[in-house]
Image (cartoon, helix red, strand yellow):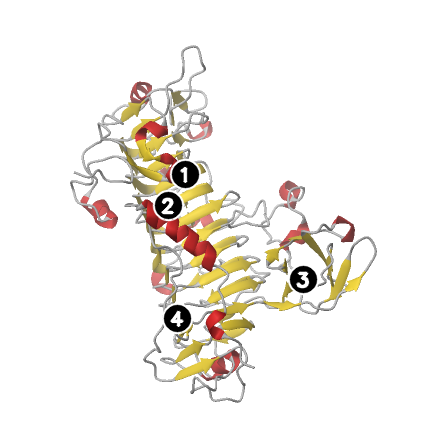
Amino acid sequence: MRPDYRTARRTHCGLFFSSFLLLTALGYAKPSGGPYGPIDQRYEIPKAAHVYYVAPDGLVDAPGTDVGRPTTLEAAMERVVTGDAIVLRGGVYRTGGLVLNQGITMQPYGEERPVLKGTQVAAKWEALRDNVWRTRWQRLFPAAPLGWWQRGREGMRTPLHRFNNDMVFLDGELLQSAGWEGELTPKSYYIDYQGGYVYLGVNPANRLVEITAFDSALVRTSAAVHGRNSDRKGPVIRGISFTQYAYRALEVEGKKRFTAADEPTDEPVGPSDPATYGKEVTGTVLENVSITYCSRVAGYFRGDGLVIRQSLISDTSTEGIYVIGSSDVLLERNIIRRNNIEPFTGYYPAAVKIFNQSHRVTVRDNLILDNPNSSGVWYDVGNRDGVFVNNWVDRAVNGFFFEISRGATVAGNVFLNCDRGVYILNSAGARIYNNTFLDAPASFERNQRSATGDHFGWHPATGPGVDQREGHVFVNNLMAASEGSRRPLLRFEQPAALCQQLARPQAQQVDGNVYARAAVPGGTTPIPLVTWGPAATESCVATAFSLEEFRGLAKGFEAGGRQLDRTPRSVFRGLDVGRFDLRQAVPGGSGVAPAEVLRVLGWSEQEGRTAGAYPLKH
């Protein structure tokens, strides 16, 4: 009997709609307020050369050209060529290891909801002593940390079994790995890789236990497959959910093929001309896609012209979206949340990582949420001309992280509850305009790291040299701190060993910013407002406790800035409901942001005469 495709459900729907309704009710202006993430809709049959219909119970021998006689997804993958489409009936497809090298479209049928799952159901269990059960499992994914992970520093914080790629779910809840049978709890599992057993610490009777059986859903390979050479065109994937995959759900290959044991970012290796990479597969598009619960990343994406729009990326481990060696990329109106859920230490996780000489990557109007053990969006190693605009970033180690790279425009964003809202490290030419920060300081730092003797080899050679890490702009931002915060709102720092070598400031311009925090009562230890370096101190860094002190330290900077001795509640319109537009006009500012910044913000010149992410209404 055919399953009821109309009632098959995406795992993300309730979570998405609660976020969507909240943000719509609040009526945000900048960021837009959504809608964000996947939107339920009816999909028309695409105008394609050939349309293949597939279903979870499709027949491998069926031609798939009639909606009433669908074939299997695996069979359709072998048949499609560039210009064709695969239309998926609703339901759960427990499949993986699919390979494709043609520029096709994949989408649902009508309003139905296809879900690709990388797990199989474990139904046969053997009861052991001490409330332990086990099942034999043949599809296991043992793994080890990559070679640069430092066990001597991190081994006491992250056990080695955490690096295996298997995942176990109990009634849809992810369990955490344990080191042996005696360590099991009702919320964990243990795997004996030598014997081929999975162990639980809870009775699995009448429970749904799912164990990973595939380490990918779909790989868009650049190699020959199914008797065809690659057409170099990326797929268009719409309205499909991918969940519960060991390693990653999606991958778009470049020139190389990578396994779970490889360093996945080594393409290109060393400083390279962008005309020589990112061209093997171009134009990949993901829209209204949900990718959740992958044991490493949601997807590795290589190739110019990538677009990921209106999608949900959630509950991943080392990264969510991983863009490598690609140019002219757009990430827009996505919900990206809960990365590093196992969690790992010493692995430098980021919910979005843009890596290795990617040029002109735009991250616009996304929700980046709930990443307390991970950076939010990290442009890392040799990137150029990034654009990060109108995003909402709440709770991350570093909201926006720009490292060993050149040229970024960061404007119109809201940063909340981050160790650093903006973190610029060993980079040049970062322009930070009209952002709102609450309990999320901004930090500009440089140090001695160079291409000589670096732990990661060639990485620093792709970015500015030690003496080139300057030219930053920090203008018209609104910095606020709660009464419990005692951190500086803005930091410019470098080590004392570089004080003579790097005597020029990192910043080209700092002006028109507003610093808001409650005044400290008399007799109380003052709270630093700004740290500044290079400075004529032993540490090469000096601390200013007021805006006047800062102007004395940094001659010619912050002439148009303002200090407000007010709590954030007195500055913002509705702090408790996430409204960060201003209660009233804030005096000051340094005029208007440059025309090119106003253009990416979508603001008029009049709207640009303000501090923070929300233009005043005139």
CA distance separating discs 1 and 2 = 8 Å
- Provide residue 311's location: percent of width, then percent of height: 41, 59
Q: Which residue is mark 1?
A: 416
| Screen quadrant of the N terminus | bottom right
CA distance separating discs 2 and 4 = 29 Å
Looking at the image, residue 250 sits to the left or right of residue 246; the answer is left
| Residue in view at x 40 percent, y 44 percent | 393
Looking at the image, residue 248 sits to the left or right of residue 32; the answer is right
Let me know if residue 321 appears in the view. Answer: no
| 428 up-or-down from 269: above or below | above
- Provide residue 511's location: percent of width, then percent of height: 26, 31
| Residue in view at x 54 percent, y 73 percent | 93
Label 2 amino acid? Answer: Trp
Label 3 amino acid? Answer: Arg
Of pointers 3 and 4, the one earlier in the residue sequence: 3
CA distance separating discs 1 and 4 = 35 Å
CA distance separating discs 3 and 2 = 38 Å
Q: Which residue is mark 3?
A: 207
CA distance separating discs 3 and 4 = 40 Å
Q: Helix, strand, or loop for circle 3?
A: loop
Q: Which dot marks residue 234? A: 4
Q: Helix, strand, or loop for circle 1?
A: strand
Looking at the image, residue 386 sits to the left or right of residue 591; the answer is right
* Mark in front: 3 vs 2: 3
Q: Helix, strand, or loop for circle 4?
A: loop
Q: Which residue is mark 2?
A: 392
Give the crowd class for mark 3: few <14, some 14-19, many >=20 residues within 10 Å.
Answer: few
| 166 up-or-down from 110: above or below | above
Of pointers 1 and 2, the one earlier in the residue sequence: 2
> In the rendered structure, are the residues bearing label 1 and label 2 in contact, judged by CB atoms less than 8 Å apart?
yes
